[in-house]
Amino acid sequence: MRALALSALTVLAMSAAPPSAQAASKTLVFCSEGSPAGFDSAQYTTSTDFDAGAHAVYDTLVEFKRGTLDLTPGLAVTWDASPDAKTFTFHLRHGVKFQSTSYFKPTRDFNADDVVFTFKRMIDPNEPFQKAHPVSFPYLTDLGYDKNIASVDKLDDYTVRFTLKTPDVVFVRNVAMEFASIVSAEYAAQLLKAGKVEDFNQKPVGTGAFVFRDYQKDSTIRYDANPTFWNRKDVHIDKLVFSITPDAAVREQKLESGECQITSFARPADIASAKKKPNLAVLSGVGFNVAYVGYNTTHKPLDNVLVRRALDMAIDKQAIIKSVYEGAATVATNPMPPSQWSYNKALKDAPRDPARARALLKEAGFPDGFTITLWAMPVQRGYNPNARLMAQLIQSDWAKIGVKANIVTYEWAEYNKRAKTNGEHDAILYGWLGDNGDPDNWLGTTLGCDAVHGSNMAKWCNKQFDDLLAKARLDTDQNARTKLYEEAQVVFKDQVPYTPIAHADTFQPISKRVHGYLISPLGGHRFDGITLD
């Protein structure tokens, strides 16, 4: 299939030349923002989990070239799609070895059995490993692949065929994402036999650039460079350490002192400071993200579109851009950024109008307002540097129209579980970082009916909207798909399942000892290709 590039996206990297190969015997310390919920990337949807799992330990069949949205071979060297976009055949790389660890010693190379197992455990509840340790796979479900993948067949040791029930022109780009990280069938069988299937999520084994060594929750994750990595020429450090540091100010201090060389999610105020430090550099890129406040449409009174419209037009987005982002963001109107092809430029926000918002509430039967919860993330994200402050500003805006919002938060993994799986929230601050460069990723994954128990935080299922997305997945013509996605955005804007707030600019402060690091337009952090002097 043809890779769809995001031509409007630009990513800036450091211009300094790589140092000599003598820098290979180095340890790279990454100050991460939180502890991962686990290392089995199929079970999660956040970059915190993907950084610790997929980006370090695993590979996918197809990958995104570092710093771009272009597809490149991974564990599959080539792939073919049938004209009807229902059958996809992947031709696998020979000689790839799974990692050898203190808890697993592989006896064979990677082959088709591993690909078949990786996907069958996600789509077949009767697969023995999944039956012994049933877990959910939210990203796969959000995409509807639990229903749409009809079969995964081994044609020979190095050829696998996927057959879909309905066409999907985005399939190859989707299986390049982290949830589709390839795992070892042999390792799973060993754990199943030993009755230790829970270790699969805590003691990962992959084919990727780094081998997991140990994890101390809320403190440290340690990895060693994988000596048998199939793409070893792209690994220039010997050890990778995650220093788990939830406090952004402490992350900044550690970066300045040299305790870590890369940090996650710097605050806007820290960017200006970092630019003045002689030992630091700040990389930048176009923000490929959206921050929003979602309305749980299964909870009253948020099931009423008049209420959602009232809440939407009461929010002062410009004040949020100024206070939360310190100007380093643009106001969001749509559920995708302007740099995404098919962005509907014709859509406009309703004017901010508290008086009109009160009138809408009265029309909806709430002349005296109501009380709801407003959930605020406990961690920084690439799309939201300060969710608590954003919640307070929105709380104040809503109070002006008679709506009382009680701010709620939980530890990050618990926040996601309670919101995604249980739908406990009323209104919620969340956001999205583009995962594959296709419009479907912004619309289907976060707003589609298949995702109501996953990343669709609004729990919104609209048949007209869903039908438009389904049609767009059938067509290989980008112009035809654009028209369908533009129409879907009109439905979104009319029904207001969530209020888009901002598209954050992307900045990455790093030590000047680091060379070769590229900002990913897809969010998260990759550590291959990096050298240290």
Image (cartoon, grey):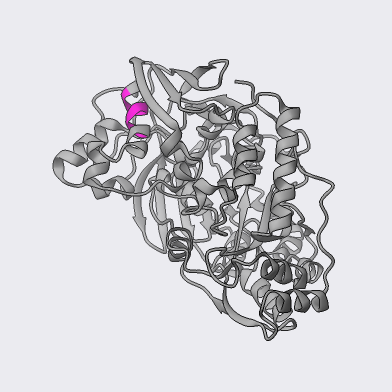
One can see residue 29 in this view: no
Q: How many marks?
A: 0
| Residue 304 relative to residue 203: left or right | right
**Most distant residue in the bottom direction:** 368
**Most distant residue in the left direction:** 194
* Residue 168: in magenta span: no
Q: Residue 169 appears in which quarter of the rendering?
A: top right
User: Could you say which is closer to the camera, residue 511 or residue 73?
Assistant: 73
Q: Residue 113 appears in which quarter of the rendering?
A: top left
The main secondary structure of the magenta stretch is helix
* Residue 115: in magenta span: yes
Q: Quick check: 495 above or below 212?
A: below
| Residue 51 relative to residue 518: left or right | left
- Identify the magenta region: 113-118
Q: Quick check: 52 above or below 246?
A: above
User: Could you say which is closer to the camera, residue 4 or residue 531?
Assistant: 4
In the image, residue 345 lies at what x, y percent?
83, 46
**Residue at x 58% of width, y 39% of height:** 530
| Residue 151 relative to residue 358: left or right | left
In the image, residue 71 lies at what x, y percent?
60, 27
**Residue at x 55% of width, y 42% of height:** 526
In the image, residue 417 lies at what x, y percent?
43, 61
One can see residue 257 in this view: yes
In the image, residue 227 lies at what x, y percent?
39, 31
User: Could you say which is closer to the camera, residue 145 or residue 286?
Assistant: 145
